[in-house]
Image: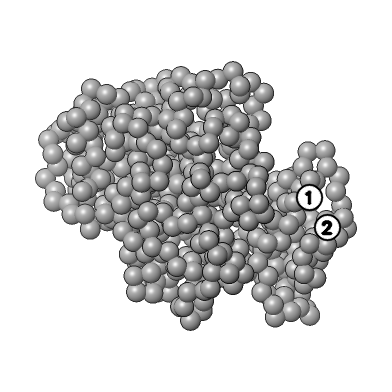
Amino acid sequence: MLVSDIVRRNAQFFGDQDAVVVPGGPTRTWSELDARTNAFANALLGLGLRKGDRLAIFAPNCGEYIEFFFACAKSGVVGAATNIRLAAQEIASYLAYVEPAAVLVHADLADQARAWLPEVPTARHVIGIGKGHGFDLDLERLIGSASRDEPPVTVEETDVYQLGATSGTTGIPKGAMMTHRNAVAAMLNWLAEMPVPESGTALQCIPFFFNPGGPAGLHPVMMKGGRTVIHPGFAPGTFLRAVAEHRVTNTVLVPTMLQMILAEPDRERFDLSSLTGINTGGSPLSAALLRSGRELVGDIFYPLYGMAESYSCAAVLRPEDQFTDGSEQQVRQLASVGKPMTLTLLRVVDPNGDDVPHDGTTGGEIWLAGDTVSREYFRMPDETAHSRSGEWFKTGDVAVVDEEGFVTIVDRLKDMIITGGINVFCIEVERTLMLHPGVEQAAVIGMPHPTWGEAIHAVVRRAVGSEVSEEELIEFAAARLAHYKKPRSVEFVDALPISGTGKVLKRELRDARRTS
């Protein structure tokens, strides 16, 4: 099955039903979406793009993003969604690596794009989206003048469909080459793990340029004839209104988004009963956050662990394994990523490539395999070779596995601190600091030390009203951790640098402090 088969099939069986809803903008039925994406694909071919060429998009969430995904699938052109939050030089560097033949630019970001477009000489065409973009080519005019027949291109399930940009937490993002097989397998994986009704409604809260916005940016709701509701950005009030108005069944949230929703004073007045499944990711849900979330919408949370290279698929903590109260072992499971998803193979291995014992203490690297996993990085043979071992993708995440098979991430290999020759997992220290009621958020990094190699430094955002001190937090951690694991220094900040998927950007923390 191909990604393009989704829109073709739905046009046959759900033709008059809504496929894409943009409040204040156009609504497209499945029949309209099928015809428009045929025309979009033919327009790309008419501009001289060919199968395998790259098409970048620089836009906020919008209805045209869905059309971009399906047009790529039908034309054989490889999509490259671009992170609009990056600085101009970062975008130029990524696109210089991707070498797009054309770039789609939204009118709202046209001025920003003009700052880096001259640095992308391979882009023969710039196509504007929306009114007032000022570029010579306009997407709507191209679609309106192109044939709505099926594009004359043969596409196979092993063909590359999108470049999934990695998070770029350690440098310029890498482009994971994602095939149609990867994309369809990922959607089936999600469908196997969460309730998705026929003709349901997905609310797009995560930016489309992040893979957790849904496999290939297309939520599995669409595979069953459902629709996607798209707002340009996330706001908690907008979320609550949209769920009630559109009877949303499924969505994706990172924990910080859920916190914002729960902080809305009038959240209880909205009818949220239509929700059947909320995927979360980026970081585990705390017991307090899960408890409050359940009080608002019910027991419908599905915390997922994955990455661009695996199409957001790897592990899931299923509802029956989520305990906010119970034995110490049960409550501890909330900090885990759960167990492998239905269509994913997962191992935790030592440096020799052998599986670690399931004792809850022996750390190893998570390796993944299966149809959702990318086969390689775009034009990076060395990076590909370093990150693969046969069929297995080496994630760089360090985890332990307990006696019941629950996998808990304890660090990134690149973030692990070596102090006095001993490995310290940052996450263990962070979770300990988070137990203090005066701590809202904590990130731990290693700082150069003349004697120990690295010293443990904590960067902390206090809870509202808290005046907890550095000395108090160090003593708090020392009472709960081995002496060598306690922070040697604590720094308080108003905010931590966070990616769109809710991850703390530790590279930024390290770089800022090691150069200051």
| Picture coordinates of residue 398, whole percent (x, y) | 55, 67
Q: Secondary structure at mark 2?
A: helix
Residue 83: in sight, yes or no? no
Q: Determine which residue is flagged by label 1.
A: 436
Residue at 19% x, 36% y is 9
Q: Is residue 31 above or below residue 120?
A: above
Residue at 51% x, 50% y is 317
Compare residues 339 and 325 and report the one nearer the observer.
325
Q: Image check: 336 left or right of 65?
A: right
Find the distance from the CA under tag 2 to the CA under tag 1: 8 Å
| Picture coordinates of residue 340, whole percent (x, y) | 44, 57
Compare residues 323 and 429 and report the one nearer the observer.
323
Residue 157: which quarter of the image?
Answer: bottom left
Residue at 80% x, 46% y is 438
- Residue neighbourhood size for the residue with mark 2, other residues' Cα within 10 Å, grouped as few (<14), some (14–19), many (≥20): some
Residue 251: in sight, yes or no? yes
| Picture coordinates of residue 442, whole percent (x, y) | 71, 53
Quadrant in which the C terminus appears: bottom right
The residue type indicated by label 1 comes to His
Q: Is residue 501 above or below residue 203?
A: below
The dot on residue 90 is none
The earlier-in-sequence mark between 2 and 1 is 1
- Total numbered badges shown on the rendered structure: 2
Disc 2 + disc 1, Cβ < 8 Å: yes
Q: Image check: 99 left or right of 457?
A: left
Q: Determine which residue is flagged by label 2.
A: 476
The residue type indicated by label 2 comes to Phe
Q: Image check: 314 left or right of 191?
A: right
| Picture coordinates of residue 500, whole percent (x, y) | 54, 45
Compare residues 508 and 231 and report the one nearer the observer.
231
